[in-house]
DNA sequence: AGCCTAAGCGGAGAAAATTCCGCTTACAAG
DNA sequence: CTTGTAAGCGGAATTTTCTCCGCTTAGGCT
């Protein structure tokens, strides 16, 4: 069912690969390989799925059945990195992983997220473009849950759900790109800003109920 | 020139209408009228510029010469509201306009921005979709300048530029939509969250240099 | 080995965005 | 009123996204 305000339906979560026919697996691999090569050559912003299909030697239908839409393919290209990233903050070593105090983990997490976005700027920009078709996709809510949990640990009196969004929202490809490329800010300045934001949130005045000032 | 990372060029600022031929002005009017009718009828997400052109009795070329691209047209539809909004916070009565203390103005401003986005959700979603083609457009930076100025007034020791982005980032159509529609949060909860965020920023611990915690 | 069928395939084609360019015309200057 | 010309026009053509549906085949079953 499509939402009547934004006209989209949720992006199917790309879970663990369910049993897949051999030819299907081979095609998936080919498509992903071609796509990442084309992106490396010319940038994610002019990736044409027709061309991917042609170069991969499959029909466009195959690409679409597998990945749903343009954004789905781009997301699949990030998926592997994302899994690694999730492993890092969920089970990896401190300060990103468990073991460090929550404020340190928050800082480390947001900084790592920035690094990921900078490393593959154009792919993330592409992802955010398609986002209005795919909505906030799986990984966003995983990150949200993580940040909210750390916040709840450090400051149980706050509205963790809201503040998690508030901390994640500035860490987006478009803003980072504009800061770095158009506004001439440095990465360090940006990260220092995030640290300051985290500090501000963690030291927020205590209010009567969660979410109040 | 196109940016080689994101492949876009800046959205031309829609300034005051420069002298325009009579037929051009008439066509602009027709296009805008048809577009807003079609959006009212069927939602911004399925606005087809071909159809707009047909119904307005002009060629598609005319639509594109005038508005540049899909996002340009959508933005033009918001332009009038935006002007009113800008007038309100720059020269209107308090608490949004000058006269109230900066913290009150910040709260009022963000709440007003939320209301604007809620009132025309689908148009703003559309705008954010096109954003990666148009980049952060004029109004974003006007809002940013405004928020940064208020922050600088209240807390001259902070990195106003960064925190302005941090306050604006959570007020976006996609997040608001997901909170309200998918997550079942109320508008009041969201606004209360923003108030708390502002409070946290304004009470941030004082650091050695701007931007540090 | 032969059969069955659901999963997978592919490409024509519909729909939408955006570009291009030769024709038309508003309107200012004479 | 005539004329020159820059501004404006329109729509065919190009490009890309995404859908549809009839054909093919991998691989389990006997």
Image: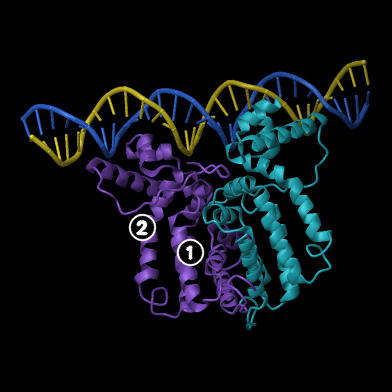
Chain colours: A purple, B cyan, C blue, D yellow
For the residues bearing labels 2 and 1, Cβ distance under 8 angstroms: no
Residue A124 left/right relative to B154: left
Badge number at residue A175: none
Q: Residue at x 63, y 70 (%)?
A: B197
Of residues C10 and B7, the one nearer the viewer is: C10
Is disc 2 placed on a helix, strand or loop? helix
Q: Which residue is mark 2?
A: A80
Q: Chain of mark 2?
A: A
- Crowding near pointer 1: few (<14 within 10 Å), some, many (20+)? many
Residue A125 left/right relative to B9: left
- Relative to A186, is B12 above or below? above
Rounded to the nearest whole Å, what is the CA distance between mark 2 and mark 1?
19 Å
Query: Residue C27: where, in percent of width, then height?
Result: 87, 29
Q: Is residue B182 at least partly visible in the picture?
A: yes
- Crowding near pointer 2: few (<14 within 10 Å), some, many (20+)? few
Residue B33 left/right relative to C13: right
**Which one is in front in this view, the residue at disc 2 or the one at disc 1?**
1
- Relative to B148, is A35 above or below? above
Badge number at residue A144: 1
Of residues A47 and B177, the one nearer the viewer is: B177
Q: Chain of mark 1?
A: A
Quadrant occupied by the C terminus of chain A: bottom right
Q: Is residue B59 at least partly visible in the picture?
A: no
Query: Residue A88: where, in percent of width, then height?
Result: 37, 69
* Mark closer to the chain start, 2 or 1: 2
On whether disc 2 and disc 1 are found on a single subunit, the reply is yes
Query: Residue A180: where, in percent of width, then height?
Result: 58, 63
Query: Residue B151: where, in percent of width, then height?
Result: 71, 71
């Amino acid at each position: 069912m499509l939402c009547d305000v934004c006209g989209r339906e949720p992006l199917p979560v790309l879970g663990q690969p369910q049993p897949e026919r051999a030819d299907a697996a081979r095609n998936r691999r080919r498509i992903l390989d071609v796509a990442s090569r084309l992106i490396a050559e010319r940038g994610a912003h002019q990736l044409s799925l027709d061309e991917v299909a042609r170069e991969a030697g499959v029909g466009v239908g195959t690409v679409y059945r597998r990945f749903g839409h343009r954004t789905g393919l781009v997301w699949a290209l990030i998926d592997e990195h994302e899994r690694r990233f999730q492993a890092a903050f969920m089970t990896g070593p401190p300060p990103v992983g468990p073991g460090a105090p929550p404020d340190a983990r928050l800082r480390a997490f947001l900084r790592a997220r920035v690094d990921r976005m900078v490393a593959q700027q154009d792919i993330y920009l592409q992802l955010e473009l398609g986002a209005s078709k795919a909505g906030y996709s799986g990984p966003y809510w995983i990150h949200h849950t993580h940040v909210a949990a750390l916040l709840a640990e450090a400051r149980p009196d706050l509205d963790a759900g809201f503040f998690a969004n508030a901390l994640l929202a500035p860490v987006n490809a478009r803003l980072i790109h504009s800061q770095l490329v158009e506004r001439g800010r440095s990465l360090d300045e940006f990260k220092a800003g995030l640290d300051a934001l985290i500090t501000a949130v963690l030291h927020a005045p205590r209010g009567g109920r969660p979410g109040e000032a």
